[in-house]
Amino acid sequence: MLQGRTGEWEVVIGLEVHAQIVAAAKLFSGAATAFGGEPNTQVSTVDAAFPGMLPVLNRRCVEQAVRTGLGLDAEINLRSVFARKNYFYPDLPAGYQISQYEEPLVSRGRVVLDLPDGSTRTVGITRLHLEQDAGKSLHDQHPRDTYVDLNRAGIGLMEIVSEPDLRSAEEAGLYLRKLRSILRYLGTCDGNMEEGSLRCDCNVSVRRPGAPFGTRCEIKNLNSVRFAMQAIDYEARRQIELIEGGGTVAQETRLFDTARGVTRPMRSKENDYDYRYFPDPDLLPLVLDPQWVAQLRAELPELPDAKRARFVAEYGLSPQDAAVLAAERATAEYFEAVAAGRDAKTAANWVMGDLFGMLNKAGLGIEDSPIAADRLGALIDLISDGTISGRIAKDVFAEMAATGADPGAIVAAKGLRQVTDTAAIEAAVDAALAAHPAQVAQYAGNPKVLGFFVGQVMKATQGKANPALVNELLRKKLAG
Amino acid sequence: MALDKATVARIATLARIRLSPAELEPLAGELSHILDWVEQLNEVATDGVAPLASVADIALPMRDDAVTDGNCRDAVLGNAPAAAKGFYTVPKVVE
Amino acid sequence: MSLLALSLAEARAGLAAKDFSARELAEAYVAAMAEARPLNAFITETPERALAMADESDARRARGEARPLDGIPVAVKDLYCTRGVLTTAASHILDGFVPPYESTVTENLWRAGAVMLGKTNLDEFAMGSSNTTSYYGPVENPWRRDGDNRPLVPGGSSGGSAAAVAAHAALAATGTDTGGSIRQPASFCGIVGLKPTYGRCSRWGVVAFASSLDHPGPMTRTVRDAAIMLGAMAGHDPRDSTSAPLPVPDYEAALTGGIAGLRIGIPKEYRADGMPAEIEALWRQGAAWLKERGAVIVDDVSLPHTRYALPAYYIIAPAEASSNLARYDGVRFGLRVPGESLEDLYEQTRAAGFGAEVRRRVLIGTYVLSAGYYDAYYLKAQRVRALIARDFTEAFARVDCLLAPTTPSAAFAIGEKSDDPIAMYLNDLFTVPADLAGLPAVSVPAGLSADGLPLGLQVIGRAFDEATVLRAAAALEAAAGFTHRPSFRAGDR
């Protein structure tokens, strides 16, 4: 609930996400979909809507959309229809987009949100349909002209529409992240919002609790979760202030100005556009074989929720740790490779702590980790069998990150084996105590002085002394 | 169905065809004449008849996911009335 | 020149017998094309290409590698994209458009060895029944009324192709039929025009008018020629999702066998109010001819929704066209009228680029698809279409094909029927139903009107049964013995 001047307000949010389908070629043509090509080099005459050109459907795009529908626990419509959405814009060469309207490929699914307090909330998915992406219009390349690049025109998109079930910007953020995670798990969309492979339009309205839905505004083309949340917050506030000030919310399409953090209406005539949808006469209805769908269902990977639950049950992880490790399929697989045959909690700590820390600093994803999962596992083994101490392991880890070398080889090359010889450690302890009589005297009143001596002994042994033994011996000698 | 000038103007905008004010009236007349003529379809009982969108009685064919096209910028830009640096150009659109 | 008098089949035989070379044949047609210029049947002549292709044909033949249509000079309706050759759709909005690709159908023809004479004139974007809406000016029918010098329309939209073939300025031509645009001009010009089953010939590379109604097909002098051309033009195309995945039969071989026992229906609703008596008489004569040759005439076939075909067509075709023509916007090809803003550019380019008929249909189409009207117009028309298709299906349970007039009149003067668009639309009364149902139909010249103009009869058949349709048409052709000549024919002294 948001507090207005005159009372409480409920924010109602529905999200329309456009997810670029992972496929080598476009939805209706054989041009490539790779990101970042030179302008207009990934464009066929079909994409550029030349006279006489015709669409032919890419089976992989249909497959990816069906798999996504299955991953969203949705109904797959065995019969669906492609329809033309007619409007004029330079990045839409045909003057229409091939989409789906009255008969989409997927209906009625759901996404489960994991709220911070550990509870869950289910958000409905109204539909998922296939459609073409548009090209790109660049307005900043020339003072008087807009430059048009059609590389993106015709790439397959899944439009995923949620029910207006979200009630806060935070929930919207959770929904986006969860949806993104599912798509990446399935491999149907890479979820890269910066590159534009995942884009979000937010429908926002406000109402008094218990009242019917208010008029909604659509905020288009948000390309980060953070901006989506900011835009929703701003828009909700804007509408509340407007209504409390005696005004009414006009149904309109708005853009989020990321620099100023405000939404403003779109200039174009988009607001009352008549798209004149009709079934595309160059295509026939799409009819799927139920056995094909069943096969796709059988071959789905384990999805995030199931994986999280299994991590808690099988590895005894806390729900929070399980959530972190299961957020990305690559991370989950990495973790399981490390945890295999080892203490799960230890594996989890190393992955979430040291590994994530190192990757974040280096700006790398887990797929590009310089430390392979089996090597991290080997490092953990070296600690558990006493070959090295936990402290030394940190150094070895850093070396592994820098060189990609095997931990065993690093320990051998640098002579980092832990010193566990009690006599040798005792000698170092005696030497340290002898060298610092003042601190010895302080120990009685200040037990923390122990740490000083631990440091001295470690220094003397190049860090290789077994810390537990060092502590034990120092305590004995200082006490006695 | 009689179309008025305002409707003709609205349709012309949707269709992106410039009409001069003088053209609106005669066009409204022509289009209304044609629409009146097609109204005779209302004489036909069509309840329960599914619309026939295509006489092609086949399943929608699908193609393999292979890159078989594109990489032909010259072909794609070769007829452009205005192009620069590999882009099509149009008068600037203000968002 | 006697070479021009040969039909396609005869020329093919002559080339095979080495009576003459492909080069000689092409030269004759290039000269004929020039001689026929007053008809304005061609938008673009491609004599150099024709001669080069003819030379290649002769070379192949010399190597013993002659192909089915090797050396045959063919004209191409300027609606088919031809690589490297100006393609206009007879519209100002495609000024200067040179496609970097070849349509599937013409590619099939060149692969079969045919030789390209040029691009023929048509009604703009195939919208018309008179070839008077072309940006490049009207086409004249090589036929004139007896004792009357007024130029007549060749019909449309494939008027240029029809006139060229009738005037012996091409040996054969490609056309497209959406509401009758192959058959009606064929009838007006006294030639054979074949609209195959929907999907028989690929639409890839053919400028789209109405996607669910466009049918590429051949226009020729004889039924045999049409069978030969169809055999080369037809075939499955994976680039066209509505293309029929069916093998192409030997249509020429299917011409033999006669029509004994063939059941031919006479659809009573094609007897339109006010239909000229001479057309009705010719129709009855046609039935008699077929009966003489052993066909069984079934007189009481009913296609009850026939009269609603035209209004249904004039909702569906403009609707699809309004969307198909949205790509003509001055951005990527063709005419651009510079504008202050993007909207300016769009609106002025399209206003200047489209002619009056195209504009009319785009506006109608936009309207019938618009919010609030989609159900009442577009969906309603598609439901009526379903009923029209069902009428045919039920009729074909009783008969093998149908015999009907092709047009409700003979050719009219250029300028007549131009006041009322609907008067022009009524030219397609008998042709439109077969387009809506996607069924094969061929028009054969059957007789002359009282003032000496050709009249055609059409045979309509079951889906993908072009063989039967052509066989019946061949019987009609043989019986009619139409040897009348137009007032103008290239090579005639």
Image: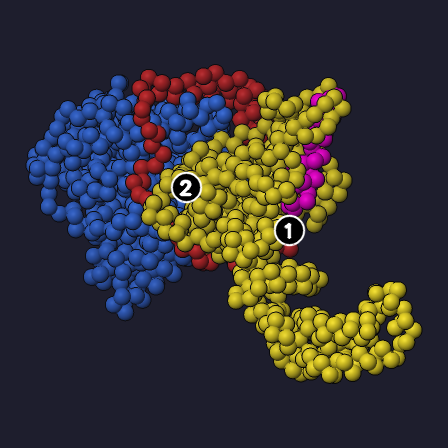
Chain colours: A yellow, B red, C blue
Q: Chain of mark 1?
A: A
Q: Which mark is residue A194?
A: 1
Q: Residue at x 85, y 77 (%)?
A: A433
Q: List the residue tagged with mark 2.
A: A76
Q: Residue furthest right?
A: A438
Q: Nearer the viewer, mark 2 or mark 1?
A: 2
Q: How many marks?
A: 2
Residue C272 within the magenta-colored segment of the rendering = no
Judging depth in this view, the residue of B17 and A319 nearest the camera is A319
Please identify the quarter of the rendering in which residue A265 is found.
Answer: top right
**Quadrant of the image containing the N terminus of chain B:** top left
User: What's drawn in magenta, residue-wise?
Assistant: A218-245
Magenta stretch, main secondary structure class: helix
Q: Residue at x 36, y 48 (%)?
A: A294
Q: Amino acid at mark 1?
A: Glu
Residue at x-position 37% and y-position 32%: C129
With B92 as the anchor, is C242 left or right in this view?
left
Residue A310: in sight, yes or no? yes
Q: Which secondary structure lies at badge 1?
A: loop
- Judge by depth and name the residue closer to the eye, A182 or A201: A182
Task: Determine the residue positioned at 51% across, 22% down.
Answer: B27
Pinpoint residue B22: horizontal percent, then vertical percent.
Answer: 58, 21
Residue type (three-letter) at the residue carrying disc 2: Ile
C358 w.r.t. B71: above or below:
above
Give the chain letter at badge 2: A
Q: Is residue A226 magenta?
A: yes
Residue A305, percent across and down? 52, 48
Q: How far apart, in angstroms, are the residues tagged by discs 2 and 1?
A: 30 Å
